Image: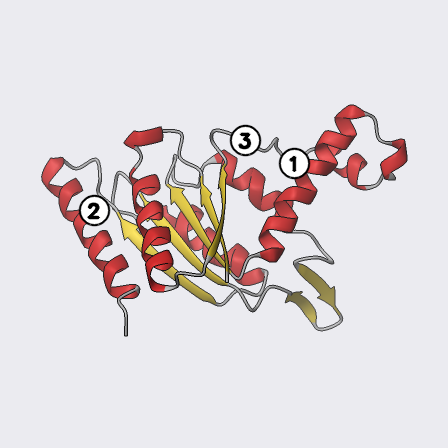
Amino acid sequence: MKLLHIDSSILGDHSASRQLSREVVEAWKAAEPGIAVTYRDLAADAISHFSAQTLVAAGTSAELRDAALKHEADLSASAMAEFLAADAVVIAAPMYNFSIPTQLKAWIDRIAVAGQTFRYTEAGPEGLCGGKKLVIVSTSGGLHAGQPSGVGHEDYLKLVFGFLGITDIEVVRAEGLSYGDDMRTKALSEATLQIGQQFAAA
């Protein structure tokens, strides 16, 4: 089994989403010792934002690309190859200003590509990634799950990956992290408990 682990927080060792996504991956590895993990840190090694140059790179044959276009094409190709090869994906998604980190959005723009991860048909769009499992590690300073303020965060991620055909989606959530030490400790403990229960050996 191949697992793709995505981190996107800019907070380094102070990041709750990084802590919890690491716990998810370690629990998964313990449950399935043969698992192969590919790791991408979108904060430390950011993918440039989707741009006109990205489109030009995709539409230019390899032999005609200059260094800048080759870099753009390689970014898209590597991100796509990792995603397509994965049987499961763990995405650490902290909330920034009622949405996901811009670094994570840039990665999504590289893997949401017509003809590769979805396609349009006469009956409408069809996702092409239905065999994958997704775990979203959702963290936020406030309380947003199920609220209008969460639409651009968890709801967006469920929507976009659902569009790609992924229906096996689980959320590990820790929210209210800025509401004081007691609330933060409680939220992280509950998330850790959820992870343990999810991957407990049968």
In this picture, residue 57 sits left or right of residue 106: right
In this picture, residue 49 sits left or right of residue 182: right
Q: Which amino acid does label 1 sit on?
A: Phe
In this picture, residue 107 sits left or right of residue 115: left
Which residue in the structure is indicated by mark 3? Answer: 46
Residue 190 lies, in percent from the top left, at: 19, 54
Which residue in the structure is indicated by mark 2? Answer: 188
Which residue in the structure is indicated by mark 1? Answer: 50
In the rendered structure, which disc, 2 or 3, sits on the residue that comes first in sequence? 3
In this picture, residue 189 sits left or right of residue 18: left
Does residue 119 sit above or below 99 in this rendering?
below
Kind of element beneath mark 3: loop
| Discs 2/1, front | 2
Of all residues, the one furthest to the left in this rendering is 182
Kind of element beneath mark 2: helix
Could you give the CA–CA distance between mark 2 and mark 3, rounded to whole angstroms?
27 Å
Kind of element beneath mark 1: loop
Residue 92 lies, in percent from the top left, at: 40, 45
Front position in the image: 96 or 47: 47
For image coordinates 70% across by 57% down, the residue present is 116
